[in-house]
Structure formats: structure tokens, C-alpha cells
Image (spheres, rainbow, N blue to C red):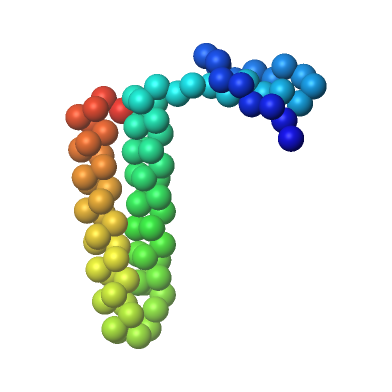
Amino acid sequence: MPKITQCKRDEYKGGGEFIVAKLTQKEIQNNLLKQAYDGEVLRQAKYSYLMDIIKDKRLKKLFKVFAMTARGHIAELKQEMQNLDIK
């Protein structure tokens, strides 16, 4: 098992030893919000696609609600990212 040590940036020292970067709270927050945003964009696209191809009206309505919910989450995340100056 490689030994893991923390330092300012990632580097491989050889001999199975990795040095892992310490992320700041801001970097962790940025990464999590970006991942959440990307996930909601994918969900919205998936549910919109399913809504278009499904014939069953009940399921079509359900996927429409899911897509609308994802759009709402996208808007909230986008606003929060703008407030925190995350690009």
C-alpha cells in the first residue's frame, strides 16, 4: 500500500509514496458546487430526453416534473456560484 503524505501540491516521490494536495475550504466548496451543477445538468437532459421518447402519459408527466425540478436546482446552483464568484 502506498504511503500518503500531505503537502502543498500533488507530486509522486517514487517508491510508492504519493504526496496529496491539501485543498482549501474554498477549493472544496468550488469543486462540490461545480459537481452538483454538472450532475443537475445531466439529470435535466436525461429526464427531458425520456419525457420526449416515453409514450405513457403518466410517466411522461413524471419525467417532466423531474426535468423541471432539475432546472430549478440548476438555477439555484448557478445563483449561488455567481454569489461566490465561482466560474
Query: How many numbered marks does the figure carry?
Result: 0
Most extreme residue toward the top is: 8
Residue 17 position (above or below residue 33): above
Q: Quadrant of residue 55?
A: bottom left
Horizontal and vertical percent position of residue 22: 49, 21
Q: Which one is nearer the viewer's eye here, 70 or 12?
A: 12
Q: Which one is nearer the viewer's eye here, 40 or 55?
A: 40
Horizontal and vertical percent position of residue 35: 41, 42
Q: Which one is nearer the viewer's eye here, 55 or 87?
A: 87
Most extreme residue toward the right is: 15
Q: Quadrant of residue 19?
A: top right
Q: Is residue 87 visible?
A: no
Q: Residue at x 29, y 62 (%)?
A: 67
Horizontal and vertical percent position of residue 11: 65, 18
Where's the C terminus, which quadrant?
A: top left
Q: Residue at x 26, y 25 (%)?
A: 85
Q: Is residue 13 toward the left or the right of residue 10 in the image?
A: right
Q: Residue at x 26, y 33 (%)?
A: 81
Q: Is residue 41 toward the left or the right of residue 19 in the image?
A: left
Residue 60 position (above or below residue 12): below
